[in-house]
Image (cartoon, rainbow, N blue to C red):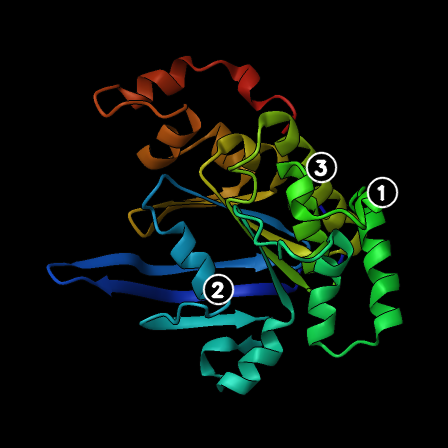
Amino acid sequence: MSDQNNTETAIRVEHVSKEFKTKTDTVEALKDVSFSVEKGDIYGVIGLSGAGKSTLVRCMNLLERPDSGKIFIGNKELTALSEEELRVERTKIGMIFQHFNLLAQRTVLNNVCFPMEILGIPKNERREKALELLSAVGLSEKADAYPSQLSGGQQQRVAIARVLAADPEILLCDEATSALDPQTTESILSLLMDINKRLGITIVVITHEMQVIKKLCNKVTVLEEGIIRESGSVREVFTNPKTKAAKRLIYVGLSEDVDIDEEADSADESFMDGI
């Protein structure tokens, strides 16, 4: 993890709540959620399906507007901005998704160029920068290929290069490795670690996979039913989980009728190797 400006706050979420109404019910996706991410962190948010993770990440850049609460990027409150001001601030935030969302009719090079086209960067400059980014993600030889000719891992690398083309200060990763096999996941996590270290970009990782948190993150928040159950350093939360939600995630999807505390006591300590 980058150690630059580690005492400065990159993202601050204050008392955020969000609900969705259906014809028959109201779903409380987030309930009074508060936490902060320091510059240079790789910060994990983990929870099972339905925990509110994707709603949270969409609230963090206001793709979903919270019903209450505030979102800050640095010292600027996103929730207080006009739509025009918000568009400017969003250029500081990149998003990487589970589905790569590449443009099928464009080559790899032109996919990476696309955000620079929108920003009005001259053609020669954006081509040069796109080639540099493809080199950085290990895909120089695929510049003229099309997305359909790439593996899943290669497509995710293109998606990462495309996000980096806009020079973001923050990357929000929503289940970015969930569709990938374990070996490819490992390579994408290593790439994200390198981006964090080399460029000093703050990364927020939304996932249901504990191994992703263990490999990549320095801090973690456990989300369950829209509520933060536990937060802290990865080492602290993994070695001494205080809540049943954290213990259930760490000790691998235990069923409801298992004594979680007993399982935790007997868990193999080698689980923590490498943290």
- Is residue 162 positioned above or below 225 on the image? below
Q: Assign a secondary structure to mark 1.
A: helix
Which kind of residue does numbered mark 1 sit on? Glu
Query: Which quarter of the rendering shows the C terminus?
Result: top right
Label 2 to label 3: alpha-carbon separation:
24 Å
Mark 3 vs mark 1: give the one in front.
1
What percent of the width, then of the height, locates residue 198? 81, 50
Which kind of residue does numbered mark 3 sit on? Ser
In primary-sequence order, the first of circles 2 and 1 is 2
- Is residue 243 positioned above or below 147 on the image? above
Label of residue 34 in the image: none
- Is residue 162 positioned above or below 142 on the image? below
What percent of the width, then of the height, locates residue 51? 33, 46
Label 2: few (<14), some (14–19) or many (≥20) C-alpha neighbours in 10 Å: many
Residue, disc 3: 190
In primary-sequence order, the first of circles 2 and 3 is 2
Label 1: few (<14), some (14–19) or many (≥20) C-alpha neighbours in 10 Å: few
Q: Is residue 159 in view? A: yes
Circles 2 and 1, Cβ within 8 Å, touching? The answer is no
Label 3 to label 1: alpha-carbon separation:
20 Å
Q: Assign a secondary structure to mark 2.
A: helix
Residue, disc 2: 60
Quadrant for residue 6, please give it: bottom right
- Residue extending farthest front: 105
Q: Residue at x 75, y 79 (%)?
A: 120
Q: Residue at x 59, y 26 (%)?
A: 182
What percent of the width, then of the height, locates residue 117? 73, 73
Residue, disc 1: 141
Label 3: few (<14), some (14–19) or many (≥20) C-alpha neighbours in 10 Å: some
Q: Residue at x 66, y 36 (%)?
A: 151
Query: Which quarter of the rendering shows the N terminus?
Result: top right
Q: Assign a secondary structure to mark 3.
A: helix
